[in-house]
């Protein structure tokens, strides 16, 4: 028995723990319950769907990005350019223009929430804010639905990079976003003691846990052990290497852009490769009430262009894009009218979102706005519709019903309509 | 009754100084409380008989002591306090401890802080007053609540003050009244919808939110009632007071104003609301039981919130709601789930007991300490947290009606956890009061974000997230709590006691109020060897494991 108190050279933690469990009976039994077995790599490759949300906090002026109005009084100074897809986009997104064969633009988004907090909630959840209930966000819903595809995952299924995202609502804390900075730093990850000692502490802990669970025979006592197991897995998992974005070669980092969002997108790619079902990357600074065009041209658009194009290109080259939905949106668009401060204000009535990957039809523009961009002229789509479509694009049933805490049955995004141009 | 209450409150304090008469005071308290405790015991035991279940055995004294400290003061007992209690002889040792925690001056401040914190979360949630765009001043509300609990303010008085308050939000400003912080950010937006739903839910157990827009299929409240209740708040405004020369909100002031009504006729100050079919109806202030007040919107004619405060105090739902809330605080589940829905559509596990306790509480002149005494002296509160063959069906976590045949495990609140770590080890207790408070808030902010708990959540199962577990594994507070520097808790333990066994016992008692098991002693021996016979480091490993265990974090 004593040998379990030393680290056998070259032994993995699992090996260690299983030996401990096997020979010392109950000690580690409770901690092993949450343990998992690696399935064969090839089987897993078949169905490993993921989604990445690039969140443009503040409300991007999509009229200057994805749905330009050259010649209109509202059009602003930017010119449209052709792309590899069947649409034109802004001249200051030249790298994205090369990738548009993989992405589609929904130009007929029409929503009613033009306040930051409300719009943020609405676009993240597919529900209008309601004081009585908290709805789960994209990340929580998708992680919840896709986790079954990856029993080997030891890191959290919903990672939010550089921002807080939106919470799990009634799905519960297990589905809350795991927040990290764009350089992949995880808070409180290190105990700063030797691995051997950590394992020994865990063994002592698992014995106390197990004793208490046995004495009380109640659920909360045994539930706790599962969280400890997950935490320990996280601290010691090889998969945590995925967060080490600084290990990427310099030229790759350069290609994504050496800024928070660029490195965040690179981290997102690494996490998809590691099997994380949902990642959100935050890029704020789109609330451009004043002097919008210089800000977009010199700062926001180049940052987005580099990172997003590199992400899509890499996903495609690695064969991951066919299983990964990428979306780019904010809480609303901005007014066609350019205000006295040369800015644009909040506008939810007619704007664009960009989506692509997995089962979504690439390279098209869905819907159209009027000549000045002030109204949607085709069938309008809402957050409910977009979320339902994205979920279907990931192969998740749109008939899936959750039960909220107060017993109400609830479809994902309240059962929006599918944007049929994007998916059959 | 008033006399009873006074005697009950003062005699124990008075007699603390003359120890010989202590037993007399306890039996006085017993007399007063006995009939209520019997009331509880009879009703609960009847339930056990009806369902043919046998309750869990009684919890042993040490575990019970830990339990009652956590529930009444919001932290576990220190090793000294625990040992002191275990040394107390006599069958009424538990009653004595309850009285000490409630009435001894040593504990007044902790008691008031703990309950002030709980009620701050009930009234404005864990995030209320944290954003500087809000008028709500968290410190202001906390100060009001702390003072209320320290001065043993009757519950009905507190409710009336919260409902009718006027004044400013921030301590130190002219006209300060901390009680306004409950309503100040709930009356302006959305026609005071939030004030309506919060007041009725928190104090009367009436869930009216859904009826704002339509008649609810299984709620006796109709849409009309929602807007009638809402009308009471329409004479009230939250006014922003700015920092001179800026647009920064310095503080808020809750004020009553004449209300012209939505038809612009103050004599007949009505409001409109819309039915689902698009038709418009009107509403005037009418209380839930149908009592009407004058329709005028002039304050000189009628102060609507004053009227509401008065009507609420007459409602039996006020009594039932607080009894249900307190019961749930101590027993882990209320008589209804959720606790703040007492409508007829939501069955109660022990309806007659809830009624009777509500009446008894009213007759105690709304003395919360008496209610606490009845509940903590009752039989179900003495039981061990053990699910056995004989009470297997008593599992409310899977939706069964609670039968209180055992103590239900539940997670400590973030506040209890922090306070327990601090009082057990002295971690986080260095520096000035402000520095300590700063440290506490920082920790709480990180922990609560990680937790994401909302107001009114009943956390009966461990819903901890990984960031929270990481924080308890590796965070600063844990590092301080497990420090072995000279003068630290572990250092003091190690210098104390006659043997390693004794020191391990102290450690286990301090964390989970029991002696170490044989397995734990064996694992400690192995840790001792692994640490090359460095006992202090072994104690550190064991202490870390104890603090991170389910047994530590679950109230049991």
Image (cartoon, grey):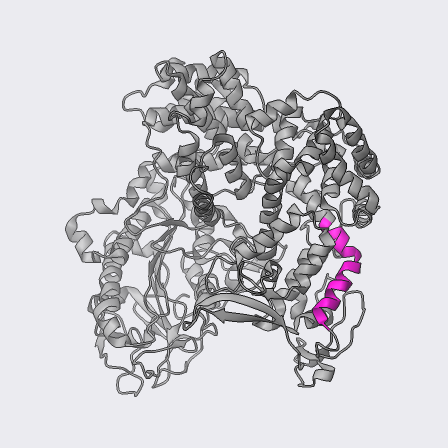
Give the camera-side residue of B107 and A320.
Answer: B107
Which image quadrant: the C terminus of chain A?
bottom left
- A152 lies above or below A364: above
Q: Is residue B496 above or below residue A166?
A: above
Give the quarter of the figure containing the N terminus of chain A. Answer: top left
Chief SS of the magenta region: helix
In this rendering, position of residue B85 left or right of residue B25: left
Q: Is residue B219 above or below residue B276?
A: above
Query: Is residue A15 something one can see in this rendering?
Result: no
Q: Residue furthest left?
A: A251
Q: Residue A390: x percent and y percent?
A: 41, 62
Magenta span: B303-322
**Residue at the image point whose x is 29% and y is 79% from the top:** A68
- Number of numbered discs overlaid on the protein picture: 0
Q: Which one is in front, B146 or A178?
A: B146
Q: Position of residue A326 (x, y in %)?
A: 34, 60
- B304 part of magenta stretch: yes
């Amino acid at each position: 028995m004593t040998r379990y108190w030393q680290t056998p050279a070259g032994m993995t933690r699992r090996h260690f723990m299983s030996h401990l469990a096997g020979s010392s009976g109950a000690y580690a039994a409770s901690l092993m319950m949450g343990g998992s077995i690696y399935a064969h790599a090839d089987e897993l490759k078949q169905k490993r769907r993921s989604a990445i949300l690039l969140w443009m906090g503040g409300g991007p002026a999509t009229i200057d990005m994805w749905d330009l109005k050259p010649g209109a009084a509202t059009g602003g100074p930017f010119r449209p350019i052709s792309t590899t897809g069947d649409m034109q986009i802004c001249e200051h997104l030249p790298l994205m223009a090369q990738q548009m064969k993989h992405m589609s633009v929904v130009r007929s988004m029409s929503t009613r929430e033009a306040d930051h907090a409300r719009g943020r909630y609405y676009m993240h959840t597919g529900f209008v804010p309601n004081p009585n209930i908290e709805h789960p966000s994209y990340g929580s819903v998708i992680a919840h639905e896709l986790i079954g595809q990856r029993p080997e995952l030891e890191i959290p299924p919903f990672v939010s990079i550089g921002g807080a995202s939106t919470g799990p609502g009634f799905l519960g804390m297990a589905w809350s976003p795991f927040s990290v900075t764009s350089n992949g730093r995880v808070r409180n990850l290190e105990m700063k003691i030797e691995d051997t000692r950590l394992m020994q502490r865990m063994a002592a802990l698992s014995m106390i846990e197990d004793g208490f669970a046995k004495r009380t025979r109640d659920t909360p006592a045994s539930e706790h052990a599962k969280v400890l197991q997950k935490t320990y897995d996280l601290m010691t998992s090889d998969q945590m290497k995925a967060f080490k974005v600084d290990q990427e070669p310099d030229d790759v980092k350069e290609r994504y852009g050496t800024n928070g969002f660029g490195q965040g997108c690179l981290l997102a790619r690494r996490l998809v490769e590691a099997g994380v079902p949902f990642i959100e990357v935050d890029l704020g600074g789109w609330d451009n009430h004043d002097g919008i065009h210089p800000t977009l041209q010199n700062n926001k658009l180049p940052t987005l262009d580099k990172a997003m194009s590199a992400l899509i290109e890499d996903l495609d080259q690695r064969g991951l894009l066919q299983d990964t939905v990428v979306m780019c949106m904010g809480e609303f668009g901005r007014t066609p009218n350019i205000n006295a401060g040369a800015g644009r204000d909040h506008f939810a009535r007619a704007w664009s979102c960009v989506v692509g990957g997995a089962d979504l039809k690439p390279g098209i523009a869905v819907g159209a706005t009027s000549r000045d961009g002030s109204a949607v002229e085709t069938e309008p789509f809402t957050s409910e519709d977009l979320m339902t479509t994205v979920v279907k694009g990931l192969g998740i049933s749109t008939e899936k019903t959750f039960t909220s805490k107060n017993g109400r049955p609830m479809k994902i995004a309240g059962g929006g309509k599918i944007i049929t141009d994007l998916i059959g | 009754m008033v006399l009873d209450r006074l005697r009950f409150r003062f005699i124990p304090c008075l007699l603390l100084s003359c120890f010989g008469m202590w037993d007399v005071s306890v039996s006085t308290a017993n007399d007063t409380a006995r009939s209520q405790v019997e009331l509880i015991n009879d009703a609960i035991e009847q339930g056990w008989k009806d369902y043919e279940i046998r309750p869990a055995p009684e919890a042993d004294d040490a575990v019970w002591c830990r339990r009652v400290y956590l529930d009444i003061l919001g932290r576990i007992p220190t090793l000294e306090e625990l040992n002191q209690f275990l040394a107390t002889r006599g069958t009424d040792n538990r009653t004595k401890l309850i009285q000490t925690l409630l009435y001894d001056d040593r504990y007044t401040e902790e008691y008031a802080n703990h309950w002030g914190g709980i009620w701050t979360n009930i009234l404005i949630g864990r995030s209320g007053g944290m954003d500087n765009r809000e008028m709500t001043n968290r410190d202001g509300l906390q100060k009001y609540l702390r003072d209320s609990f320290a001065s043993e303010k009757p519950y009905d008085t507190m409710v009336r003050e919260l409902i009718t308050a006027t004044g400013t939000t921030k301590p130190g400003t002219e006209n300060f009244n901390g009680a306004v912080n409950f309503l100040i950010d709930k009356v302006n937006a959305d026609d005071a919808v939030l004030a309506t739903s919060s007041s009725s839910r928190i104090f009367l157990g009436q869930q009216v939110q859904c009826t704002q827009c339509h008649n609810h299929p299984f709620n006796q409240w109709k849409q009309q009632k929602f807007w009638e209740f809402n009308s009471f708040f329409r004479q009230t405004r939250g006014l922003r007071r700015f920092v001179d020369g800026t647009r920064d909100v310095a503080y808020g002031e809750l004020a009553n104003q004449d209300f012209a009504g939505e038809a612009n006729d103050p004599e007949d100050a009505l409001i409109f609301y819309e039915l689902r079919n698009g038709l418009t109806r009107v509403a005037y202030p009418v209380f839930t039981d149908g009592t009407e007040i004058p329709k005028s919107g002039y304050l000189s004619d009628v102060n609507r919130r004053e009227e509401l405060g008065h009507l609420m105090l007459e409602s039996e739902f006020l009594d039932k709601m607080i009894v249900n809330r307190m019961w749930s605080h101590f027993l882990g589940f209320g008589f209804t789930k959720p606790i703040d829905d007492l409508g007829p559509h939501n069955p109660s596990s022990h309806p007659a007991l809830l009624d009777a306790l509500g009446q008894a509480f009213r007759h105690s002149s709304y003395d919360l300490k008496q209610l606490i005494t009845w509940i903590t002296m009752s039989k179900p509160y003495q039981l061990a947290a053990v699910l056995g063959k004989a009470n297997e069906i008593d599992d409310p976590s899977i939706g069964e009606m609670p039968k209180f045949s055992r103590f239900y495990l539940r997670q400590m609140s973030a506040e209890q956890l922090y306070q327990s770590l601090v009082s057990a080890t002295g971690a986080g207790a260095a520096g000035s009061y402000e520095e300590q408070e700063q440290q506490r808030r920082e920790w709480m902010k990180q922990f609560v974000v990680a937790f994401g708990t909302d107001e009114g959540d009943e956390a009966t199962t461990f819903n901890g997230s990984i960031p929270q577990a990481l924080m308890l594994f590796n965070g600063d507070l844990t590092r301080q709590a497990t420090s072995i520097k000279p003068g630290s808790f572990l250092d003091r333990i190690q210098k104390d006691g006659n043997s390693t066994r004794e020191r391990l016992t102290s450690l286990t008692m301090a964390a989970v109020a029991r002696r170490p098991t044989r397995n734990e002693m064996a694992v400690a021996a192995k840790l001792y060897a692994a640490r090359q016979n460095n006992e202090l480091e072994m104690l550190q490993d064991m202490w870390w494991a104890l603090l991170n265990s389910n047994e530590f974090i679950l109230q049991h």
